[in-house]
Image (spheres, rainbow, N blue to C red):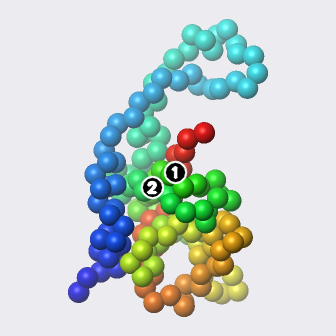
Amino acid sequence: MVSVYSLCYLKSGFMKTYQERSALAVVSSSNTAVAGFASAADEHMEDRIDLNKLLVHKKEATFFLRMSGNSMIGAGMFAGDMLVVDRSLKASFGRIVVACIDGEFVVKRLIKRRGKVFLYSENDKYKPLEVSKLEEFSVWGVVTNVIHKV
């Protein structure tokens, strides 16, 4: 028997994304970014930021997925963005989750309304999905961060 997780892996090509997660990203940065006149003291500050330490809290349970589509634009998630997903976190209502529906990954907000559980898009063009009406459904992980270009 093939599990729902296995179907999601096979249909999404996710294993390639999983292998890319071990890259170390380090940048040079000051503590803050001033949106006006910079302080003279700030010009001499330089800290190193390890993005893995900032974004990855449980290495074995953290994955990076590339966003596609426009159903989550209201949450600041756009096509091409990199999602940081933590599978060790409990999916609670109100959180944005990666779910597996009929063998496909989707990114939606998990909501409970009138005793029913829904997956909501952050775009009015899409209707909520009632979880009880889906044939195959599982929460795969919780989105913790979004990385996108400006």
Q: Position of residue 2 (x, y in %)?
A: 26, 82
Relative horizontal placement of residue 131, taking residue 60 as reference (left or right): right
Q: Is residue 144 visible?
A: no
Dot 1 surroundings within 10 Å: few (below 14), some, or many (20 or more)? some
Q: Residue at x 61, y 66 (%)?
A: 71
Classify 91 as above or below 131: above
The numbered dot on residue 133 is none
Residue denoted by label 2: 66
Q: Position of residue 42 (x, y in %)?
A: 63, 14
Amino acid type, residue under disc 1 in the picture: Asp
Quarter of image, res 85:
bottom left
**Quadrant in the picture for the N terminus:** bottom left
User: Of 63 and 12, which appears nearest the observer?
Assistant: 12
Q: Position of residue 81 (x, y in %)?
A: 52, 51
Q: Residue furthest right?
A: 36
Amino acid type, residue under disc 2 in the picture: Arg
Q: Residue at x 50, y 52 (%)?
A: 80
Label 2–label 1 contact, CB within 8 A: yes
The numbered dot on residue 81 is 1
Q: Residue furthest left?
A: 1
Classify 137 as above or below 123: below
Across the whole image, how many numbered discs are drawn on residues? 2
User: Of 32 and 1, which appears nearest the observer?
Assistant: 1
Closer to the chain start, of discs 2 and 1, is 2
Q: Position of residue 147 (x, y in %)?
A: 52, 46
Relative horizontal placement of residue 79, taking residue 4 as reference (left or right): right
Dot 2 surroundings within 10 Å: few (below 14), some, or many (20 or more)? some
Q: Residue at x 42, y 82 (%)?
A: 102
What is the secondary structure assignment of the residue under circle 1? loop
What is the secondary structure assignment of the residue under circle 2? strand
